[in-house]
Image (spheres, grey):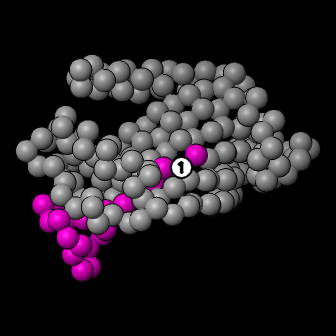
Amino acid sequence: MIRSRLFMVFLLAALSGSLMAADPFLGYISFAWENDMYFRRDYYYSNGFQLEFFHKKIEVSPFSRLLLPPGRKQTGDSYHGLQLRQEIYTPKDLSADTIAAGDHPYSSTLTLSQVKITDNAELGIRYISELRLGILGPAALGFKTQELAHQVSNPSRPPQGWDNQVQNDLILNYNFQFEKRLL
């Protein structure tokens, strides 16, 4: 059962690369999974995934008006998307069931973002703006996600300290990037 789920995740990841190559006006979907087990360690930024969907119809969302650059008359092509992201952080010692001074606490985030990317190939500029809403703490399901990952990858070393994780709180974040091509 777990192996078939893992197979589906890898299949989705492989297919998302070919979908991203499609015409951006038709939209695309992508999936990314990051895990420190690839490097045989399990601490600090421990795991993350992102599911991303871009499509023209997302432009009609009421949140689009909050994303820069404003309006429809900006120079360049605009692409609108949604991102679902989870990030998990753990301390260095997963066997400890208490908080260690100076170590990273157990924590996780689960966020949903609306993103706008505006490209002007002629001027070599790109604007990326993002409005991110989410939750920090047990409601972000970090313990459940890491427990599942350990059942698949390392059942002999389950993490012990999730009872001490950072408590629930809301996340509201706005990101803006400006990029300029140099050559």
Q: Quadrant of the N terminus?
A: top left
Q: Residue furthest bottom?
A: 101
In percent of width and height, residue 64 lies at 78, 45
Q: Nearer the viewer, residue 32 or 93?
A: 93
163 and 52: which is toward the camera = 163
At label 1, which amino acid type do we have?
Answer: Thr
Residue 22 belongs to the span the image colors magenta: no
Q: Residue at x 46, y 33 (%)?
A: 31
Instruction: Kindly identify the residue that appears in the image at 27 percent across and 19 percent down.
Output: 4
**Residue 181, percent from left and from top:** 66, 52
Q: Which residues are magenta?
A: 91-112
Q: Using a 10 Å C-alpha cutoff, classify the residue at mark 1 as few (fewer than 14 neighbours), some (14 to 19) or many (20 or more).
A: many
Q: Is residue 54 above or below residue 133?
A: above
- In the image, residue 122 above or below residue 28: below
Q: Quadrant of residue 20?
A: top right
The answer, for residue 182, to whether it is visible in the render is no
Tell me, yes or no, if residue 137 can be seen here: yes
For the point 44% across and 51% down, the residue is: 140
Front in this rendered view, residue 102 or 119: 102
* Residue 99 belongs to magenta span: yes
Q: Residue 132 appears at what percent x and percent y?
A: 62, 53
Residue wearing tag 1: 111
Q: Position of residue 58 (x, y in %)?
A: 73, 34
The extreme right residue here reads 73
Q: Secondary structure at mark 1?
A: strand
At 39% from the left and 55% from the top, the residue drawn is 138
Main SS, magenta region, reads loop
